[in-house]
């Protein structure tokens, strides 16, 4: 029996192992096997990837069989072709009922999958009750990252990436944010997608300084670059019952080999193919917090992991070797994570991609574009829009496509 994949669940309480006969689930403390599922009688074949949703009975499974061409035959006979399960088919499996909940077929091999639970409903779920409607599935292909809402199996988002052979993606669900990080379309870039619950009402009053009528000086660089985090999150694109904001950052010069988020999502560690450092960033602002030097003959970084207390960074290379670095606690504490009313300097990140269409981005880019094309409209007389226009002009003059990390 061949061992194909092993990964922790979202809270680290279980390990899910995929093999040729099915999958196994191990409890981490104490380390014992709690489930040994043999699926050979289901004719599903070998399991290549297995992802568990917390401590529930829902799993996302990807087969290890030959690629299935969706153009074969009629759609009504698809279920006959995808058994045994193929490399381009993801199956959501209910281990309580031993049935397939849903199957998604893609036009390329699936390299990675992630399950994300709705943070506003349940933190940790131990049974099937009330769970099916409130989780997301993230599927990674070579050039695409798909996000599905599994209540109605609807596509929430699709993002383009550079050639992502190793299926790099990282997710985090905290009390305030759902975060997805993956490589961007350009070399050395990372895209961070923020999902927040739509607010019932704005958190800014009429007397807030952001909306005062006092004109701003265009020479004040700090005022052009500083935004309230809460302001950014509330002004994203509406996706279902959530706001979506996309941050795009240029962090390395060469191809990115690893990207990971801390459990709370506020720290992000990245590594590149040719770089001599592993870098730790503030996820929301792109601010560099700490660098970790690679030793001689370090090899290519394949995986980074940040512990739940943000004290240690573990790095695995293709040598294979394991390195553990200590994170500067004082530097991390200065970032004021979790404070939605803090001001953030977006000098190292970009909330707009100039090459995108209006339909693919949020309200910020639409406001940028409208204000630049029509600088004499009433929109630009508002203090908030003046701030946005100044920010945009600065980005266009400095970096033609995306903000760069210096």
Image (cartoon, rainbow, N blue to C red):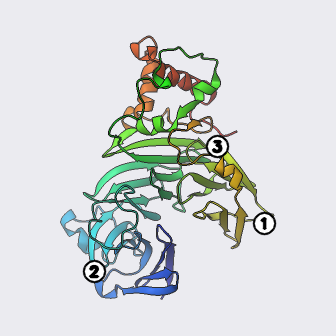
> Which of the numbered marks, if any, corresponds to residue 287?
3
Mark 1 surroundings within 10 Å by alpha-carbon count, few (fewer than 14), some (14 through 19), many (20 or more): few
Q: Residue at x 60, y 16 (%)?
A: 217
Q: Nearer the viewer, mark 2 or mark 3?
A: 3
Q: Residue at x 37, y 81 (%)?
A: 45
Q: Nearer the viewer, mark 2 or mark 1?
A: 2
Residue 391, compared with residue 96, is above or below; it is: above
Mark 2 surroundings within 10 Å by alpha-carbon count, few (fewer than 14), some (14 through 19), many (20 or more): few
Q: Of label 1 and label 3, which has the lower sequence position?
A: 3
Q: Residue at x 62, y 46 (%)?
A: 335
Front residue of 117/48: it is: 117
Q: Position of residue 236 (x, y in %)?
A: 41, 38
Q: Nearer the viewer, mark 1 or mark 3?
A: 3
Quadrant for residue 106, please give it: bottom left
What is the distance, in whole Å, between disc 1 and disc 3 at their CAs?
Answer: 28 Å
Residue wearing tag 2: 98
Residue 296, compared with residue 200, is above or below; it is: below
User: Which residue is most to the right?
Assistant: 296
Residue 22, compared with residue 169, is above or below; it is: below
What is the distance, in whole Å, between disc 2 and disc 1 at their CAs?
Answer: 47 Å
Front residue of 83/352: it is: 352
Q: Secondary structure at mark 3?
A: loop
Q: In which quadrant will I find the C terminus? A: top right
Residue 107 appears in view: no
Front residue of 81/199: it is: 199
Residue wearing tag 1: 297
Q: Secondary structure at mark 1?
A: loop
């Amino acid at each position: 029996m061949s061992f194909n994949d092993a990964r922790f669940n979202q809270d680290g309480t279980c390990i899910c192992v995929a093999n040729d006969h099915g999958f196994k689930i191990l409890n981490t403390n104490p380390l014992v096997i709690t489930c040994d599922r043999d699926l050979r009688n289901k004719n599903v074949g070998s399991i290549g990837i297995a992802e568990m949703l917390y401590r529930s009975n829902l799993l996302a499974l990807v087969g290890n069989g030959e690629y299935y061409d969706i153009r074969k035959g009629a759609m009504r006979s698809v279920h006959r072709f995808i058994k045994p399960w193929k490399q381009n088919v993801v199956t959501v499996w209910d281990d309580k009922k031993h049935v397939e909940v849903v199957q998604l077929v893609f036009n390329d091999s699936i390299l990675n999958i992630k399950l994300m639970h709705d943070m506003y409903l349940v933190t940790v779920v131990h049974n099937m009750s009330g769970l099916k409607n409130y989780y997301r599935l993230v599927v990674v292909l070579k050039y695409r990252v798909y996000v599905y809402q599994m209540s109605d199996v609807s596509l929430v988002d699709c993002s383009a990436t550079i050639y992502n052979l190793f299926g790099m993606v990282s997710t985090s669900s905290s009390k305030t944010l759902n975060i997805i990080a993956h490589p961007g379309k350009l070399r050395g870039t990372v895209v961070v997608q923020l999902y927040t619950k739509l607010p019932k009402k704005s958190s800014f009053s009429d007397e807030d300084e952001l909306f005062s009528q006092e004109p701003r000086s265009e020479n004040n660089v700090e005022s052009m670059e500083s935004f309230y985090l809460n302001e950014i999150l509330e002004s994203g694109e509406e996706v279902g019952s959530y706001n979506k904001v996309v941050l795009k950052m240029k962090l390395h010069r060469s191809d990115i080999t690893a990207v990971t988020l801390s459990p709370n999502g506020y720290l992000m560690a990245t590594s590149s193919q040719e770089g001599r450092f592993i870098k730790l960033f503030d996820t929301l602002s792109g601010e560099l917090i700490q660098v970790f030097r690679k030793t001689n003959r370090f090899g290519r970084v394949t995986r980074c992991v940040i512990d739940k207390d943000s004290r240690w960074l573990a790095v695995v290379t293709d040598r294979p070797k394991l390195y553990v670095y200590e994170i500067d606690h004082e530097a991390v504490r200065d970032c004021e994570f979790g404070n939605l009313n803090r001001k953030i300097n977006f000098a190292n990140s970009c909330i707009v991609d100039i090459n995108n269409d209006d339909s693919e981005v949020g309200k910020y880019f639409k406001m940028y574009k409208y204000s630049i094309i029509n600088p004499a409209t009433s929109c630009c007389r508002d203090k908030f829009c003046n701030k946005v226009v100044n920010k945009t002009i600065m980005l266009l003059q400095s970096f033609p496509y995306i903000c760069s990390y210096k």
